[in-house]
Amino acid sequence: MLLNGERGPDCMSFCLEASGRADECRLFNIPIAPFSLNGFRQGQIESHFQLSANTTTFLAILSTRRFNAFLSHCDSEHIIEKLQSNNALQIDPSLHADFRKKFQYLLECQPRTPQQRRQTTNHLYTAFLNAITEKSKPKYLTFSPSPRQKLVKEFVDWGFKNADQDFSLDQICESLFASRRTLIQGTKESFNMGPMEMMKRVRLEQGNWILRTPEARLEKNFRTISEIAQFYGFQSRGHFAKAYQQAFEESPSETWLKSAS
């Protein structure tokens, strides 16, 4: 699964891979480290996650302003600078396991009242603070993608913006000012697939988002699955349905029905 897009100026996140398969997940095309928290860099206006179908990943989205106020209240303002210049850190395996149990519990016992939600938020803030304080000896990881990884990210961004257009590989390379060889090597390293197969995956992700979101279908005036398939470059509904089933393990009709319930 690809998660790609912009996030608001008051938004930060902590991402935790919980199934012990960190090597199958990437953040901005960089494999994440075992026992790590990722994606929290403050001031970052975009997100780019690659998640494997064989993994479980928890994602907590926080208000940057409120979390920084919490840090100030706890006399931990000095940590803010680290959160603004780093995007990942490794923590003790036992602490990582505690996080995994905590997230699982919150998913199973979601807060229902405003008071419970406030308590849950404070509980999470405290857990994150404990993980990033010097007492826990966190290892901040340098965020430095290679030129090829940056190119692949640009390609994915370009793909989502142009998912409804039909481009050849040469036209894509020309738009990105890249050679065919460099782009092919980059996508195979990051996604184990070529650029055109990657574009097909991006179109499927866009189709999945439309099928899951009634407001998006209304905005684009989609009334049938065939219209969605055609818009994203699939020759027929059957071709789209087969590729969609392989990617998401359910049919387009099933996704549509779930969004309407």
Image (spheres, rainbow, N blue to C red):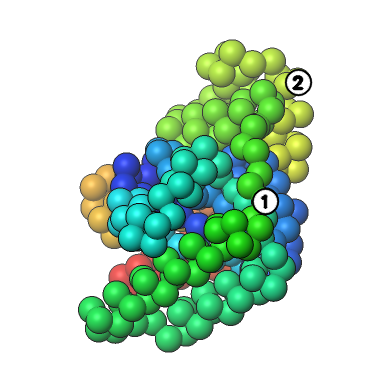
**Location of the C terminus (image quadrant):** bottom left
Q: Which residue is mark 1?
A: 139
Between marks 1 and 2 in the image, the one whose residue lies nearer the viewer: 1
Residue at 43%, 86% (x, y): give it. Answer: 109
Residue at 66%, 58% (x, y): give it. Answer: 137
Residue at 69%, 73% (x, y): give it. Answer: 94
Q: Position of residue 22 (x, y in %)?
A: 71, 58
Q: Amino acid at mark 2?
A: Arg
Could you tell me how far apart the alpha carbons at marks 1 and 2 are, in whole angstroms?
A: 36 Å
Residue 202 sits in quarter: top right
**Location of the N terminus (image quadrant):** bottom right
- Camera sees residue 257: no
Residue at 73%, 58% (x, y): give it. Answer: 34
Q: Position of residue 182 (x, y in %)?
A: 73, 21
SS assignment at label 2: helix
Q: Position of residue 253 (x, y in %)?
A: 44, 66
Q: Which mark is residue 181?
A: 2
Q: Amino acid at mark 1?
A: Lys
SS assignment at label 1: strand
Viewer-side residue, 212 vs 137: 137
Vertical relation: 105 (above or below) 164: below
Q: Which mark is residue 186?
A: none
